[in-house]
Image (spheres, coloured by chain):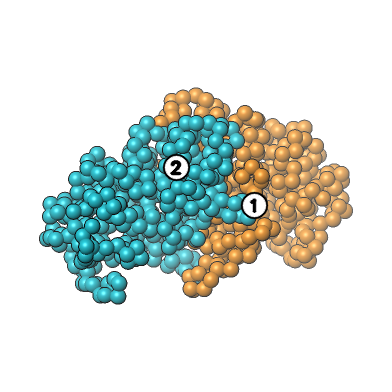
Chain colours: A orange, B cyan
Amino acid sequence: MSTNGYHVAVVGATGAVGQQMLVTLEKRGFPIASLKLLSSKRSAGKEITFKGESYTVEEATPESFEGVQIALFSAGGSVSKALAPEAVKRGAIVVDNTSAFRMDPEVPLVVPEVNAADLRGNKGIIANPNCSTIQMVAALEPIRQKLGLKKVIVSTYQAVSGAGLEAVDELKSQTADLLAGKEAKPEILPVGGDKKHYQIAFNAIPQIDVFQENGYTFEEMKMMNETKKILHMAELQVAATCVRLPIETGHSESVYIETEQEGATVDELKSLLSDAPGVTLQDDISQQVYPMAANCVGEDDVFVGRIRRDLDQANGYHFWVVSDNLLKGAALNSVQIAESLIEQDLLS
Amino acid sequence: MSTNGYHVAVVGATGAVGQQMLVTLEKRGFPIASLKLLSSKRSAGKEITFKGESYTVEEATPESFEGVQIALFSAGGSVSKALAPEAVKRGAIVVDNTSAFRMDPEVPLVVPEVNAADLRGNKGIIANPNCSTIQMVAALEPIRQKLGLKKVIVSTYQAVSGAGLEAVDELKSQTADLLAGKEAKPEILPVGGDKKHYQIAFNAIPQIDVFQENGYTFEEMKMMNETKKILHMAELQVAATCVRLPIETGHSESVYIETEQEGATVDELKSLLSDAPGVTLQDDISQQVYPMAANCVGEDDVFVGRIRRDLDQANGYHFWVVSDNLLKGAALNSVQIAESLIEQDLLS
């Protein structure tokens, strides 16, 4: 490691994930020699405090990346597509939190606890998986290692902060309006750029991201394709239903799996998960202990509970996975990728 | 049918479901010769208006059922256990909306669109299934008839009104408190009588009803056992995960099924469901049309959408089912059972 730390840029510094990236970099004492906060033209000029020092946010341009060693991107897919190659051209390694490069076979898609080795041989861009994928594979990997994995069926319970700070504001203002007997005014969710917008307060919207021709949303396809890529299991059966809920932060997932090996007990699964890196077991039904979105906010780990055997299928199990979608689901995992690059001596 | 209608009693008339029963009886023009509104001692004395006339709620006792022909019960399992047999003893037929008798082999468990024939041979008590079961089997039955059914995996998104009016108040007051920067004070949910209570506002609680030793909640076991009983399929594989959400009314369900027959197209499923009684198809992803809790409130039907094939399993399908948990999930289904008894000439 460079003795003075690294020259770091955060692209999308004013967004929901960008803000958590800064909190995470500071909290984990990431070795920073210099820091550039970049954004769109619209947010440029804002002042942000990091480690007690004030930084002016600059508009991100190709030239912004001169001298940058590591760039954390979270400013939307089109920004990443335009600027990540420019950053790489100038010698930076990019950790990209958008979907722009995730399924590119040349780009490693990494959850460090699961497949840190995939960082070797990167060509400058590393993709951070989708938030709902990250927490699920963190729970699946310890089970896969011991029992193998054949099938995954997941239904998600996703928080609005995954759609950005404007979606959080929309949830709050709609909720206040409805409590006051006024009408809800949907303007952003389920998808800012889609044709129709629906009330999120006191509702469940079975659409996250736009629809594909096959009937699945892009969010669902992300979970399905990314899970196979991260676990190196093209043959894994994965199906997802993704649902947006009136929760500010914290994604939950109801997961059903079928393992290769039959007959493992719930205690064996609990033991695998409690030993797994980045996973905290919260599972004691006698005391009503299980993970919940409201308890995971600001926490680094992926929380797993409600583990039980399927009553019909000898290799079937159900469980409930919860994590802070802005932290492990986004900012923390990006910073952990950067840390893993350093540990593996992959950052020059 | 009796020319003047029937002598009807509603037990639990002041509760969330009881109120909807009265609305439903009135809306559907149920033939009523006389109406008794019964409740616990605590609520007795309240005045309730029905068809423009004021009724005083009376405490339910065994003698209350003298002369009653049909009694709709929704006042909790212990009230049903104590008083339903007393009502039957006095010549009434009981439609019970609690779980007290649902799995009794002597008691028909009925969703009229699915198994109205089971009402024949009843011994005085008919059980109304659990809200989350009713809407699911209404969607499953047309598929089962044509394609057969092997496996069902469901994750629910359930509204708080299923836990009563106090739970609705708790959601509203907690939500207002949190928006005002105050702390949430959990006192009722997830289960009034259980040891611990958790914040429901802006949260997802993976517990409805108390836990069983096998790791499933009683709500989950209800869905699993009742589905098999209603469909007359002891061999059906059914697994449920039931989750309480900050939604006032309207249960949603993410359902995965495997059919006996392989290869049916999504259009075939859509056609089966659009022809099914009590089911409305809401499925046009090109226009972002899918069912949502906020749109189903006050509606009688079960709404189905997001129908798509599993990409790995040739007999696998996913869909999204939404219904008003107080209507088709409870009050409406109970009244429909009473109507079916009349149609089948089973009410003397």
Question: Which residue is at the front of the view, B346 or A291?
Answer: B346
Q: Amino acid at mark 1?
A: Ser
Callouts 2 and 1 on one subunit: yes
A265 w.r.t. B57: above or below: above
Displayed quadrant of residue A17: bottom right
Report the residue at 30% width, 43% height from top: B117
Q: Mark 2: few, some, or many residues within 10 Å (few <14, many ≥20)?
A: many
Residue A150 image position (x, y, % from top left): 55, 29
Displayed quadrant of residue B150: top left
Residue B156 image position (x, y, % from top left): 45, 48
Residue A1 image position (x, y, % from top left): 76, 40
Report the residue at 25% width, 75% height from top: B54
Residue occupied by mark 1: B286
Image quadrant occupied by the C terminus of chain A: top right
Report the residue at 43% width, 66% height from top: B172
Question: Which residue is at the front of the view, A332 or A254?
Answer: A254
